[in-house]
Amino acid sequence: MIEPGGADRAALLVGFARGLEDALAGLLGPHGFTIHRVGTVADAVTLLAATPAHLVVASGRCPAASVVRLVAALGEPRTARVLVMLAGRDVEAERRYREAGLKHIMTMPVTVAEILRVGGMAEDPPRAGHAQ
């Protein structure tokens, strides 16, 4: 599912429950992101082959090995940063992701400023007509 944000940036949300996905889309959309949503890492790899993204946010429900495959599928030079978003503090899950080589792991709740900072993107003001 694609939600246009009138932007030159795209964000891909992978494996989130619908309510959380909606919340993340609501945070990123006003900052100029077109939002893409997929249910699995396999679907994300397929979508990324055809549609580049600047930011990929994977749910902590996605297995670490799958997210590593997703990062590998992006190739080099990589134009997207991959973040893993954990639903709450989970030392064991964070350890698994880090051991798998993933560096950008966040624990909810998060702000849009934190997502953009960890995602390596300058904070842009919300676009006209969008509430923050």
Image (spheres, rainbow, N blue to C red):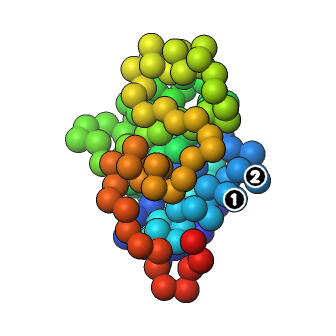
Residue 88 in percent (x, y) is at 67, 32
Q: Nearer the viewer, residue 19 or 122?
A: 122
SS class of the residue under badge 1? helix
Q: Is residue 47 visible?
A: no
Q: Residue at x 47, y 39 (%)?
A: 83
Q: Residue at x 63, y 49 (%)?
A: 38
Q: Is residue 120 visible?
A: yes
Amino acid under disc 1: Asp
Q: Residue at x 76, y 53 (%)?
A: 19
Q: Nearer the viewer, residue 109 or 53?
A: 109
Residue 9 in percent (x, y) is at 40, 64
Amino acid under disc 2: Arg
For residue 132, the mark is none
Splitting the image into 4 quarters, where does residue 58 fall? top right
For residue 22, the mark is 1
Position above or below: 28 against 74: below
Splitting the image into 4 quarters, where does residue 14 fall? top right
Describe residue 62's horizontal placement relative to residue 65 as left or right: right
Q: Do callouts 2 and 1 mark residues in contact (Cβ within 8 Å)?
A: yes
**Quarter of the figure that contains the C terminus:** bottom right
Residue behind mark 2: 18
Residue 95 in percent (x, y) is at 52, 15
Residue 92 in percent (x, y) is at 60, 14
Describe residue 48's horizontal placement relative to residue 43 as left or right: left
Q: Residue furthest bottom?
A: 129
SS class of the residue under badge 2? helix
Q: Residue at x 63, y 22 (%)?
A: 90
